[in-house]
Image: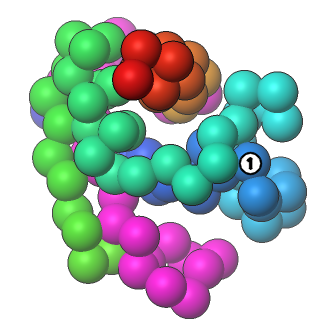
Amino acid sequence: MVENVIYPAYLDAELSRSEGRRVAAEEALSDPTVDEIAQAVQQIGYDAVIERDVTYSREYEPRGRVLAQGTEDTTKNDLVQAVAAYVGLLRDDS
């Protein structure tokens, strides 16, 4: 089973590309959470497992990460882009 790891830093508007952001600045979000990311992964159609006590290698504080399981039909970049779009939509609905 293919797993892709998604850290909140990948979507964080406060970070630069060299600090770990993987989406365009226009698509980035302020302070994304693992819960929002997991919900977006499930909306896309994959299983999500939250690991809360994990720290991204370029950060000092643990924010967790989400394991997206069963993603053999997509690339990591496409997955991260879709998750960013869904989290943005989830925030608009709230």
Residue 27 screen position, x and y as percent: 72, 27
Which residue appears at 26% of the width and 14% of the height? 43
Tell me where residue 15 appears, x and y as whole percent.
77, 59
Magenta span has 62? yes
Quadrant location of the C terminus?
top left
Majority secondary structure in the magenta region: loop
Residue found 83% across the figure and 52% down from its top: 17
Q: Is residue 55 visible?
A: yes
Side of 33 where 43 appears, left or right? left
Q: Which residue range is magenta in the image?
A: 55-78
Q: Is residue 59 left or right of residue 69?
A: right
Left or right, 92 with respect to 38, comes to right
* Residue ID at (57%, 55%): 31
Furthest residue to the bottom?
A: 60
**Quadrant where the image shows the N terminus:** top left
Q: Secondary structure at mark 1?
A: loop
Residue 55, x across and y down, in percent: 43, 78
Q: Which residue is mark 1?
A: 13
Q: What is the tally of numbered marks visible in this picture?
A: 1
Q: Nearer the viewer, residue 26 or 5?
A: 26
In the rendered view, would you say 35 is above or below 93?
Answer: below
